[in-house]
Image (cartoon, rainbow, N blue to C red):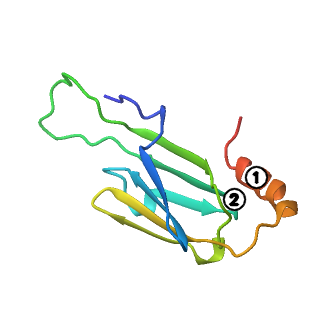
Amino acid sequence: MLLNENRVWYPPIELIETDTALILRAEIPGVKIRDLDVRTTKSLISITGKRHEQHFANEKELICSQLHYGQIECLIELPVPIQNHRVEAELVDGVLTVIMPKAQTWDTSKNQENIQEILALFPA
């Protein structure tokens, strides 16, 4: 039985600012790292991926489910510019942690270009 394979869901996130970096955490239980795509520009972070349904051999009927399956999408405008070439990400125990070192200066001429690049990842 396919429950939500065609639905889009948005993982709960938190974004923390330190003196030197932005740290994003997203809860994505049951998602494998190979099923995730994390992209950044100086002003945005995009997380996309897919969580596949799991079935058991002796499964008869689904009684209730509050789990999310299907396409994951998350697009966040960052409050300060980052050094997107130095971003680090790890997935541990269903929590994706992305560490984004802050940039020294903000180049507003590049901002619109970066936004258009990332928005192209999400078809209308």
Which residue occupies the foreground of this view, 21 or 113? 21
* Closer to the eye: label 1 or 2: 2
Q: How crowded is mark 1: few (under 14 residues within 10 Å), some or many (20 or more)?
A: some
| Location of residue 10 with respect to 29 vertically, above or below | above
Mark 2, residue position: 43
Residue drawn at 21 percent across, 25 percent down: 62
Position of 92 compared to 59: left or right?
right
Q: Is mark 2 on a helix, strand or loop?
A: loop
Q: Is mark 1 on a helix, strand or loop?
A: helix
Q: In which quarter of the image is residue 37?
A: bottom right
Q: Where is residue 10 in the image (x, y as percent from the top left)?
A: 47, 40
Residue drawn at 76 percent across, 52 percent down: 115
Position of 80 compared to 91: left or right?
right
Q: Residue furthest right?
A: 109
Q: Which amino acid does label 2 sit on?
A: Ser
Q: Position of residue 7 (x, y in %)?
A: 48, 31
Mark 1, residue position: 115
Q: Quadrant of the N terminus?
A: top left
Q: How crowded is mark 2: few (under 14 residues within 10 Å), some or many (20 or more)?
A: many
